[in-house]
Each structure stands twice: as C-alpha cells, then as structure tokens.
Image (cartoon, grey):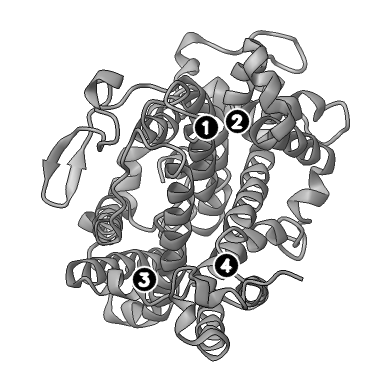
Amino acid sequence: MSRFRLHGTVQPGYRWGPFTLRVPFIHVAVEIPELTQGLFIAGATGLSIVPLYMEWWGMSFETAVAIQYESVSERTAFVTAVVLLVGVIFLVMGASGFGYRLLNLVPRALKAGIILGAGMSAIYGEFVPRSDVSASRIETFPVCILVALCLSLLLMFSQPLEHWKKRSRSIAVLSSLGMAPGFFLAMLIGPWVGEVSYKKLSDYFVEPGTGEWLLRPADIFFSPGFGQLFSEFSLLVQGMPDLEFFAAAFPVAIAAYVIGFGDIITGTAIVGHAARERPDEKIPIDERRTHLTIGCRNILQAIFSGPFFPLQGPLWTGATVVVAERYRRGREDMDSIFGGIFSYLMFGIPIFYFVRPLLELFRPVLDVAFSLTLILTGFACAYIALAIPQNRIERALTVLIGMVIMYFSTFLGLVVGFVASVALLGRRAWKKNTEEDSILNTDF
C-alpha cells in the first residue's frame, strides 16, 4: 500500500463532494492485528447490547444481533424519533457550518475537561451497579477484568517493553494485537476462578444426558434476522412516528448531540495526538464532514433498522485509541490510519456475526470485553486530556470540568467549563502558549 501515498500526503481515494471513498485492497490495506481485534473484541463488545434489545423491544436473539415506554410499539416509535432527530441536528449543524464554528469557540481547558470527563465516566461506570438486581461488571468479573486490563496496558502502553519489542519479534507481534491477548487470557482463566461458565456452550454441542453430538454442519452458520428487523422495525414499513414522539424525543436528541459534540473533540484529539508522530501521512480532519456523515448515518439507520440507539455519537473511543496507538509507532507497523480503521470496524465484525459457534463461545464473556474497552478508553482519554493544558490553572480547570461531567452531565460540564475558563483565563483560554503566559505556566 505504501506506493499509493507519497510522503506527507493524504491517503488516496475517490473524492465525492466533502467525502472520500477508499476501497479496501485498493486504497487501504488489511491490518491483521486490527482485523483480529475487530473479529473478537469488537464483535463481543457489540453483542453486549443484544440483551437490551431482547428485553426492551421483544426482539429474538437473531433479530437483536442484526441491530421508557410500556409497549414495544411506543418504545420503537420513540427511539426511532430520537435517531431521526439526532441525524437532522447533525446535518443542519454540518451543512450550515455552525457545528465547526461552535467547536472553535471551545476553550482549550474545556476541550481537555470534556476528554477527561469522558474517560473518568467510562471508568466510573464500571463500578456502578447496572440495576437494582445486577451488580457492576467489575464486581461480577473482578479477576477476569483485572487480568485482561493489566496485560492490555502492558502490551499497549508500557515504555520499558518498547525496548523488548525491538529485540523480540514475538513480543512485537503480541503487542500489536492490543486488547486481544488480555481478552483471550480472561477467557481462559474465567472458568478457573468461577467467573465464567461455558456450560451452555458445551450443551449447544453435546446432549448433556446422552453425550450425543448435536452440532450439524447447517448449524455452523448463523443467519441474523435482517428481514425481520426490516419488516418489524424499519421506518419504511412502520411509518413515521407521531408528532408526540418527536416532541418527547427532542430533549433527548439535544442531549445526544451535546455528547456527540464531546465525542468529536475527543476523537480529534486522539487522532491529532497520533498524527504528530506520523509526518508521512496527512490526516484530513474535517468537523463539518463528521457532522454530515453522522447525520446521514442516523437517518439511514432509522429508515432501514428503526431504533438503533447505541451509535448516536461519532466515536467509538476504545477502537480509536487502539488503532491510533499502533499507528503512532510508524509506517512499518501501519501504513495508513484508514487501513487500521477499516480492518477493525469493517473487515472483522461482519464475519463474527455469521458463525454461530463463535457467537456461543463469546456469550459468557461479553461483559468482560465491554468493560475492558471502557477502562482502556478512560486510561487513554486521561493521558491525552492532561497533555492539553498549558498552565496550572488550565490543569485545575480540566479536572474540575471532568468531575462535573462524570458526576452530573456533559451539558452542565460545558456550561461550567466555559464560564470558568472565561472568568479565570480570559482571552488566554483560546491562545496558544506564548511568552505572555510564562507566569501562568509556572509549576509548583
């Protein structure tokens, strides 16, 4: 793939308006480490939302894999309205250019606080009970999550290990797999410590009473219920929700945009942080294009699959961090960041969902993968956020804003952060570091 991009230029593709189409194997290469993680980690993380669909919308497992009211029809109409409104808001903000101008109005300390708040919220959420009857994931899988987390941190972020990666090919390959080794280790030790049971998996293959082999060749392949998803939940079949659902959904859609706004800031910082170490590739970051992409995606999701609520924002922070971390090591590790993203999110996941034995294998450890992704997200957001402040006041504001976001809401964090930045920093809140900031930059 290196022959397709000159040093310091943008990865080639087919331009169409503000977008660029990059075709796999033509414009982007397959990155095996990211494909592996997409196949297992991302697949397992995605499946963790399936029980919610089964409970709230009465979907079968097959239909749920393909995708606050009492009745299922009302829930469907309400969430579909949310998806549509979020899409419209992003489209309007992108087409008008107001979303881009709004991002430029965000003070530096507030940007750092948003990223830190997202990271702390991700970690904090793993210690909070999921419901009145369900313990937190960290309480349910303490050993599995801790072991997977420790190994993942070591392989992805250990500075002493960098020396051994250069001397040992096996260590380098293992480290390139990111979260996958830690996740596999958790799967192995889970039964030993009593946190994971594969009893249902064995029952799926072998009759418990007779020991008869049950799996037939036809059972290997899994067929997600795309047809049922379309016929029972799509906007084309169910029709447009009533105005009352749009009225109820509007405040939720605004909140979703605020969270998505924070996601754009976080994603820009993560990619920009990695891009500084890769002068061989120019990454075109365009917030207006991001707004348009999210708007089109949400509207198409509502039309064809109805209430698809998990991906209302623009960023999967965990996956972005994993790809960016290996990308920053150099072109010999990852030719282009687009290859890593394609491999993680496009090449691996679809394969996973069509092989039933893999689905059954990962059912018991879905929460481990989900928790591992969120905690690593928090770790990465912390080191990126704390590198942005340029003086002691900005560092303090970053922590303050992060705490408000974690304990209250993103919207309140934005308000508090903007007011505090203006009051404590004035115009310096938007300035790059200069000599006139030397007094503020004094460390104690």
Q: Measure the alpha-carbon separation of dots 1 and 2.
A: 8 Å
What whole-number distance in Å separates the C-alpha atoms at marks 1 and 4?
26 Å
Please report whichever mark, 1 or 4, sits nearer to the chain's N-terminal start. Answer: 1
Task: Please tell me the numbered disc located at residue 178.
Answer: 2
Sequence-first tag of 3 and 1 = 3
From the viewer's perspective, is residue 118 above or below residue 54?
A: below
Whether residue 405 can be seen here: no
The quadrant of the picture occupied by the C terminus is bottom right
Q: Is residue 385 left or right of residue 279?
A: right
Residue 353 seen: yes
Q: Residue furthest front?
A: 435
- Mark 3 Cα within 10 Å, few/some/many (few <14, many 20+)? some
Q: CA distance from mark 3 to mark 1?
A: 27 Å
Label 2's element? loop
- Residue 24 is left or right of residue 112, and the answer is left
State whether residue 56 is above or below residue 110: above
Dot 4 falls on a residue whose secondary structure is loop
**Mark 3 or mark 2, which is nearer the start of the sequence?**
3
Label located before the other in sequence (1 or 2): 2
Query: Does the CB distance between marks 1 and 2 fall below 8 Å?
Result: yes
Mark 4 or 3: the one toward you: 4
Give the tally of numbered discs.
4
Query: Does residue 118 sit above or below 230 in this rendering?
Result: below
Residue type at mark 4: give it. Answer: Gln
32 left or right, relative to 82: right
SS of the residue under disc 1: helix
Residue under label 3, please give it: 103
> Can you identify the residue that label 1 sits on?
326
For mark 4, what is the residue? 390
